[in-house]
Amino acid sequence: MIYLNFTNLDEDTQQYLLSLSRSDIESKYGVQLKRYAKQNNLSYQSLLEQEAQRNLYSFDYVFNI
């Protein structure tokens, strides 16, 4: 679970959450994503970014108001 302060959803917090998601995806599926990107002539970084954004929806958020 990720605990967030409702009043602190600024750009820095959003980037922090995206970096958490990116590192989560890279640790779980990094090798598979690199292989897929190479086979399909895709940019690994853009593929990682897309998967990180999708992964944000799987997080459990708790908002403190």
Image (tube, grey):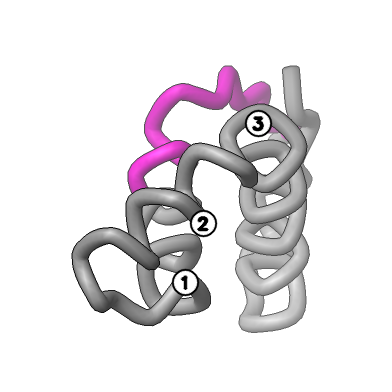
Three-letter residue code for mark 2 = Lys
Residue at 62 percent of width and 67 percent of height: 14
Q: Position of residue 38 (x, y in %)?
A: 38, 66
- From mark 1 to mark 2, how far is it between C-alphas? 6 Å
Residue at 63 percent of width and 64 percent of height: 9
Side (left or right) of 9 relative to 55: right
Q: Answer whether residue 7 is magenta in the image.
A: no
Three-letter residue code for mark 1 = Tyr
Q: Which residue is mark 2?
A: 34
Residue 44's tag is 1
Query: Which sits in the foreground, 38 or 16?
Result: 38
Side (left or right) of 7 relative to 54: right
Could you tell which of marks 3 and 2 lies nearer the N-terminus?
2
* Quarter containing the N terminus: top right
Q: Which residues are magenta?
A: 54-64
Could you tell which of marks 3 and 1 lies nearer the N-terminus?
1
Residue 60 placement: quadrant: top right
- From mark 3 to mark 2, how far is it between C-alphas? 35 Å
Could you tell which of marks 1 and 2 lies nearer the N-terminus?
2
Residue 63's tag is 3
* Quarter containing the C terminus: top right
Three-letter residue code for mark 3 = Phe
Q: Position of residue 5 (x, y in %)?
A: 77, 46
Q: Position of residue 33 (x, y in %)?
A: 46, 48
